[in-house]
Amino acid sequence: MEVARDAGALLSYDPNLRLPLWPSPEEAREQIMSIWDEADVIKVSDVELEFLTKSDKIDDASALSLWHPNLKLLLVTLGDHGCRYYTKNFHGAVEVFPVKTVDTTGAGDSFVGALLFKGATPALPTEAEVVTLLKA
């Protein structure tokens, strides 16, 4: 992370919480937060937001409690309810397009990859397919 930052890279972070892989929830929370302040862009799911804030609320106050001074963008994905986004100066929400869900594996990675315009996952739609969906 230090080398990437020194080279001018934008650092994105998706904790991708998998509690069974951790010795305890406390250890997971501590380790996830140990590098939190290093990220420029952070994406969490609604479940991760609840876990990290120790709250059952998915709202602006909960999300903004995770803000740090160097953060440029905080994203909270809400499954089939879209996402919320937060910047230093404004925040809002984006609705979803209704689609037939086949498999959600990699959905968060695809979301961030598409946002950053990177990644090469073959399951992702092409730019032309996205434009067609947006026009429909």
Image (cartoon, rainbow, N blue to C red):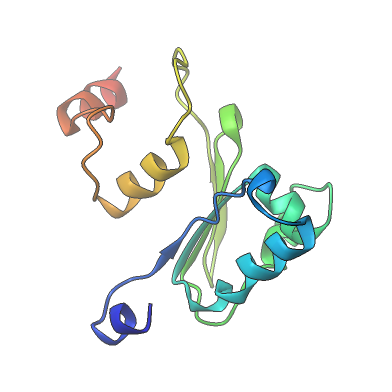
Depicted 116 relative to depicted 78: above or below: below
Looking at the image, the residue that sits furthest to the left is 128
Residue 96, x across and y down, in percent = 49, 29
Looking at the image, the residue that sits furthest to the front is 23
In this view, the residue in front, 109 or 88, is 109
Residue shown at the point (64%, 68%) measured from the top left: 31
Residue shown at the point (69%, 52%) measured from the top left: 49
Left or right: residue 112 compared with residue 92: left
Residue 11 placement: quadrant: bottom left
In this view, the residue in front, 91 or 98, is 98
Residue 87, x across and y down, in percent = 52, 66
Left or right: residue 4 compared with residue 65: left
Depicted 100 relative to depicted 116: above or below: above
Residue 111 placement: quadrant: top left
Residue shown at the point (55%, 78%) measured from the top left: 37
Residue 109, x across and y down, in percent = 40, 44
Left or right: residue 130 compared with residue 62: left
Quadrant occupied by the C terminus: top left
